[in-house]
Amino acid sequence: MSSPDGKERKLAPFEYDYESLRIGGLAFAVVLFALGVLLILSKTHSKNLNQKCQAPGDEEAQAENLMVAKGKEI
């Protein structure tokens, strides 16, 4: 490649294509975000299938009730 004054310019061995890099990074971020949302929703959905509707803080109380119930059976 020659410059306006007629001298040859040496090209850099690697130059970033910032537009493609930005678009690729944005697409990657969207995919990771969507996977995170799906993971969270799948965990809450599987909890709802296994349990009746309960308040979010009831897991500890349920675990204590389960331990007490198991202790009475023995």
Image: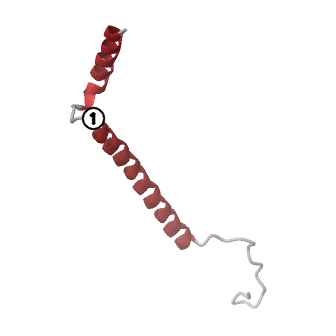
Name above or below for residue 28 compared with residue 44. below
Horizontal and vertical percent position of residue 68: 31, 12
Residue 51 position, x and y percent, is 27, 34
Judge the density around disc 1: few (<14), some (14-19), many (≥20) Cα neighbours within 10 Å.
few
Q: Image quarter for residue 52?
A: top left
Q: Is residue 68 above or below residue 28?
A: above
For image coordinates 26% across by 32% down, the residue present is 56
The quarter of the picture where residue 45 lies is top left
Q: Dividing the image into 4 quarters, which one contains the C terminus?
A: top left
Left or right: where 38 falls relative to 19: left
Identify which residue is drawn at 43% across, 54% down: 35
SS of the residue under disc 1: loop
Q: Nearer the viewer, residue 58 or 1?
A: 58
Quick one: 73 or 39, which is closer to the camera?
73
Determine whether 38 is above or below 10 in the image.
Answer: above
Toward the viewer: 5 or 11? 11
Relative placement, left or right, of 29 versus 45 is right
Residue 59 on image: x %, y %: 30, 26
User: Badge 1 is on which residue?
Assistant: 51
Which residue occupies 71% across, 87% down?
A: 3
Q: Residue furthest front?
A: 73
Report the coloring of the rendering: secondary structure
Q: Is residue 13 left or right of residue 69?
A: right
Q: Quadrant of the N terminus?
A: bottom right
Residue 69: quarter of image: top left
Q: Amino acid at mark 1?
A: Gln
